[in-house]
Amino acid sequence: MKYFAFFILLFSINSYGQTKPCDLTLKDSPTIRGLKLGMSFEQVKNLYPSASLFTDWASLDKNKIANSAFSKNLESIHIDFSKLNEVNEISFSYDDSVKWDSSAEFTDAISPSLNLSKGYWYCPRQLACHLPEVQRNLDCNSFGMSVIFLLDKPTLTIRKTFAELAIEEKQNQKALSETPENVKKKKAFKP
């Protein structure tokens, strides 16, 4: 009987993972409220001129968003920028004007409008997936998403993967080493 219970437990752990592999790339990542991963600092500034913009992050609350379509059901947006002044991560904190029973219900509702398969989402807390969920994740080739519920309010975060960030950092380092000034220094270098 112990082995049967262990087998059922093991089967249930594996059955709550991501049901469909996501092979989407960064260019396929969704645009949400006009924002997309990889956008430049200037593009964000033009889209949200009233945002509190800093060198590596930006913050907006719904009272500062001029476009009413972008502010509906929203409390705030937080944006992180890379060293290349591109959007690395965006978090959307929604208000409680829409009541959701679970993060699964929320992700099922938003997936079609974001052109994402519902099968991409999974519960990271595998043993608790049968309970009302508070978190769901999605992992693709170069970006990931998560939904977390706090006080019955969803927060949706979309971010570049660590691998994508490492590729960008390597490209940035290469670009810095190939500046005309550095190329000149390399040619003049004497051991």
Image (tube, rainbow, N blue to C red):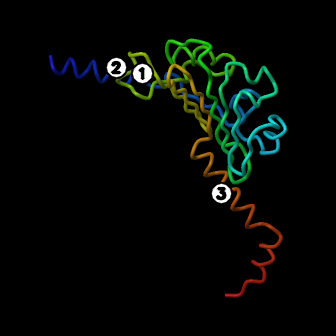
- Residue 16 has which mark? 1
**Residue count near mark 3 (Cα–Cα under 10 Å), binned few <14, some 14–19, many ≥20:** few
Task: Compute the Cα span from label 3 to label 1.
Answer: 35 Å
Tell whether label 3 touches label 2 (CB within 8 Å): no
Tell whether label 1 touches label 2 (CB within 8 Å): yes
Residue type at numbered disc 3: Lys
| Mark 2 element type | helix
Task: Compute the Cα span from label 2 to label 1.
Answer: 7 Å
Residue type at numbered disc 2: Ser
| Residue beneath disc 3 | 170
Residue at the spot x=66%, y=43% of the render? 80
Q: Earlier in the sequence, mark 3 or mark 1?
A: 1
| Residue beneath disc 2 | 12
Task: Compute the Cα span from label 2 to label 3.
Answer: 40 Å
Q: Please tell me whether residue 158 is drawn above or below residue 122 in the rendered image.
A: below
Quadrant where the image shows the C terminus: bottom right
